[in-house]
Amino acid sequence: MSGVYARRFARRIAVLATTAALTLTGLLVTAPAAQAAPPTPVSATTARSYLSQLTVKAEGSSTGYSRDKFPHWITQYGTCNTREVVLERDGSNVVQDSNCAAVSGSWYSPFDGATWYAASDVDIDHVVPLAEAWRSGAASWTTDQRRSFANDLTRPQLIAVTDNVNQSKGDKDPAEWMPPRTAYHCYYARMWVHVKYHWDLSVDSAEKSKLQSVLNGC
């Protein structure tokens, strides 16, 4: 065996040994390949087109709204719920225990540019908040539709961010709140419009005006 092939063989054996050790200790959780970010939203050009097609009307009432009407976080696979899936996806070097809880790793919050090393410092933000969705059309959905929306991993609707930044956002739309990091505004507007368009949610006039302004500057 040549020196090059011997080194490759040794590396392969080392990887297999590490995997076996993690499996024996219960730390290895089979999961989809991490991409360290939510799904990429549509381009600014497409977002502008989508925005022009959204229904514009005054926000509906919050009467009857409850987070319980948007069941989350649901099991995605094994012992992993949606929150843990997003933590693993959006983080770096994330290690999960046998219950799928993130026990180590790091998370960069694009909303404010902060990096965190404990999952407890990170919230999973619904880009279009649940209450905002309720006032924009989700009040008439079935529970199954609301469950799918609240756990949507296919659209750019869920993202790991600094917990207190997410809390400051609350259920505000872009006319009322944008990420503190201005460099992320264009991307955030693209995410917001992508989600609202897919789920056929309406926008109010102030919300549309703000989104138009941001997207025109992309």
Image (cartoon, rainbow, N blue to C red):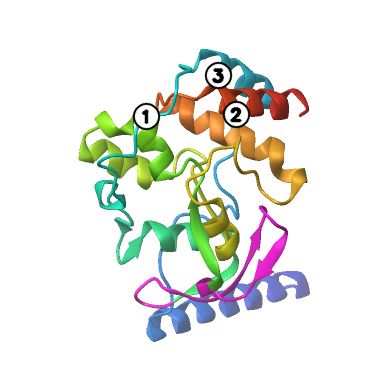
Q: Which one is in front in this view, the residue at disc 2 or the one at disc 3?
A: 3
Seen at 76% across and 45% down, the residue is 182
Residue under label 1, please give it: 60
Q: For the residue marked with disc 3, what is the amino acid?
A: Tyr
Q: Which one is in front in this view, the residue at disc 1 or the one at disc 3?
A: 1
Horizontally, residue 214 falls left or right of residue 88, namely right
Q: Secondary structure at mark 1?
A: loop
Q: For the residue marked with disc 2, what is the amino acid?
A: Val
Q: Secondary structure at mark 3?
A: helix
Residue under label 3, please give it: 50
> In the drawing, what numbered circle is on residue 104?
none
Q: Secondary structure at mark 2?
A: loop
Residue 105 appearing in the image: yes
Specify the segment rendered in magenta: 97-120
| Residue 150 point in image, percent of width and height | 36, 46
Q: CA distance from mark 2 to mark 3?
A: 9 Å
- Picture quarter containing residue 91? bottom right
Residue under label 2, please give it: 42
Between disc 1 and disc 3, whose residue precedes? 3
| Residue 171 point in image, percent of width and height | 47, 46
Q: CA distance from mark 1 to mark 2?
A: 27 Å
Q: CA distance from mark 1 to mark 3?
A: 21 Å
| 109 magenta-colored | yes
Q: Pointers 2 and 3 in contact (CB under 8 A)?
A: yes
| Residue 209 point in image, percent of width and height | 63, 23
Seen at 63% across and 19% down, the residue is 48
